Image (cartoon, helix red, strand yellow):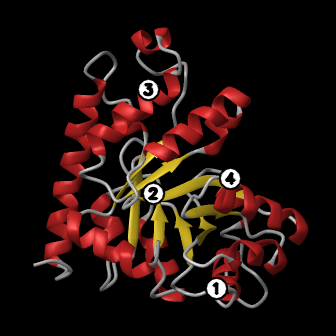
Amino acid sequence: MTREQLIAEIKRKKSFLCVGLDTDINKIPKHLLETEDPIFEFNKTIIDATKDFCVAYKPNIAFYESMGERGWESLRKTLDYIPENIFTIADAKRGDIGNTSNLYARAFFENSNFDSVTVAPYMGEDSVTPFLAYDGKWVILLALTSNKGALDFQQQVLASGEKVFEKVLGVSSNWGSTDNLMYVVGATRGEDIGEVRKVVPNHFFLVPGVGAQGGSLSDVVEFGMTKDCGLLVNSSRGIIYAGKDENFGARAAEESKKIQEDMESHLRNHGIIG
């Protein structure tokens, strides 16, 4: 999916919501365990309930590969079921030496046909550029995360006066472009999103941490929104586990619609939609 197509979908749906398909066999409604493929049946219901309110789906690959061959099959069926106009993110956090990254890129872009994959930048340019070689595909690079351990490295100040995450942003922004490179930016502190936006003013951000993790959508918009929106805001648990029994699809629809309506208001206030 191109940048122009993604922006058009955001404007059409009046939403920049990404739904995280972090599907845990131990958390889905018990009646699904009687089906042939409980993970896919859960995802199928969630997709049917939320596809009108979101512009992206983000399966966290760990939830699927932890189940071995059966999990990969559930992921394949899930990916096939997602409508073509919705952006897909393999939340895999890959990143290795060049020849290995080539194979990771092949796995997610050729064999699975995801639109994007999350990548860790720690090993540098040659670990990231193989993913950038695919037309119409995106790298979503880890920039500033919201987990406790982020303080161990990302916020450390270098001799140059830059923080580590600022160095990562400044260097990596030359590896790709605003057409194929996004950044993961945690939502728990709006001011941090603003600091990232100063370094990369026009790139899209994938923003986790809104909702169950305590991040504020208003803060994300205030500090991160651009003239083209420039945001994909992810919600996982707050949507997919909103309902605990047979009504889980309806509850997911309610929660995603609520977020979409909030996003529509922000898009109007910023003049992105009429």
The reply to whether discs 4 and 3 touch (Cβ–Cβ < 8 Å) is no
261 or 87, nearer to the observer: 87
Q: Nearer the viewer, mark 1 or mark 4?
A: 1
In the picture, the quarter occupied by the C terminus is: bottom left
As drawn, 231 above or below 74: below
Marks 3/2: CA distance?
32 Å
Q: Looking at the image, which residue is at 49% across and 12% down?
A: 33
Q: Looking at the image, which residue is at 32% across and 63% down?
A: 16
The reply to whether discs 3 and 2 touch (Cβ–Cβ < 8 Å) is no
Left or right: 22 as drawn, with respect to 273: right
Residue 150's tag is none
Sequence-wise, which precedes: disc 4 or disc 3? 3
Amino acid at the residue labelled 1: Gly
Marks 1/4: CA distance?
27 Å
Amino acid at the residue labelled 4: Gly
Residue 149's tag is 4
The quadrant holding residue 253 is: top left
User: Which residue is under mark 1?
Assistant: 176
Q: Nearer the viewer, mark 3 or mark 2?
A: 3
